Amino acid sequence: MKRLTPKEEAIMHILWHLKKGFVRNILAHLPDPKPSYNTVSTMVRILENKGFVGHLAFGNAHEYHPLIDKHSYTRYYMKSILRDYFENSYQHLVSFFAGEDDFDPAELEKLLRDIKEQKKNG
């Protein structure tokens, strides 16, 4: 799996939300200023070539649908951030955020409780 560009991610978020759609449906959900129809069509075909999107043909029109679910991509993306920026260490990740001004230790305590509960319920 490859990382998507921000514009590709925006289209994937729309397709994950819609479940399926034509280029005009995707375009309708993009924020202003909207890109051209041809630009969106090209980006969707790029996503198809990368294996993220499939389509069903209805004459000359194509209805696109995600081939990669949002959870799988999020997991891949987060693991690549952990690897590329935090030496594959959750401790380094948490330490990074703990140093931020808006860090709330109560959130970390709740997170630890949630993790322990998930492990316990397995």
Image (cartoon, rainbow, N blue to C red):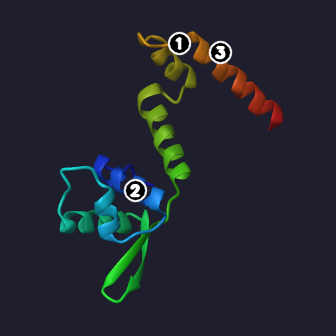
Q: Earlier in the sequence, mark 1 or mark 3?
A: 1
Disc 2 crowd rating (10 Å Cα; few below 14, some 14-19, many 20+) is some
Q: How far across and down, in percent of the image, does residue 101 sit?
A: 41, 10
Disc 2 and disc 3 in contact, CB within 8 angstroms:
no
Assign a secondary structure to mark 3: helix
Residue annotated with mark 1: 104
Q: Quadrant of the N terminus?
A: bottom left
Q: Gap in Å between the C-alphas at discs 2 and 3?
A: 34 Å
Q: Amino acid at mark 2?
A: Ile
Q: Amino acid at mark 3?
A: Glu
Q: Earlier in the sequence, mark 2 or mark 3?
A: 2
Disc 1 and disc 3 in contact, CB within 8 angstroms:
no
Assign a secondary structure to mark 2: helix
Q: Which mark is residue 14?
A: 2
Q: How far across and down, in percent of the image, does residue 13 sit?
A: 41, 52
Q: Gap in Å between the C-alphas at discs 1 and 3?
A: 9 Å
Residue at left offset 51%, top offset 15%: 95
Disc 3 crowd rating (10 Å Cα; few below 14, some 14-19, many 20+) is few
Residue at left offset 47%, top offset 57%: 16
Disc 1 crowd rating (10 Å Cα; few below 14, some 14-19, many 20+) is few
Q: Earlier in the sequence, mark 2 or mark 1?
A: 2
Q: Is residue 81 left or right of residue 25?
A: right
Residue at left offset 60%, top offset 17%: 108
Q: Which mark is residue 109?
A: 3
Q: State the image quarter where residue 114 is shown.
A: top right
Q: Which mark is residue 30?
A: none
Q: How far across and down, in percent of the image, does residue 53 sit?
A: 42, 66
Q: Is residue 39 above or below residue 94?
A: below
Q: Is residue 2 above or below residue 79?
A: below
Q: Amino acid at mark 1?
A: Asp
Residue farthest right in this picture: 121
Residue at left offset 27%, top offset 50%: 31
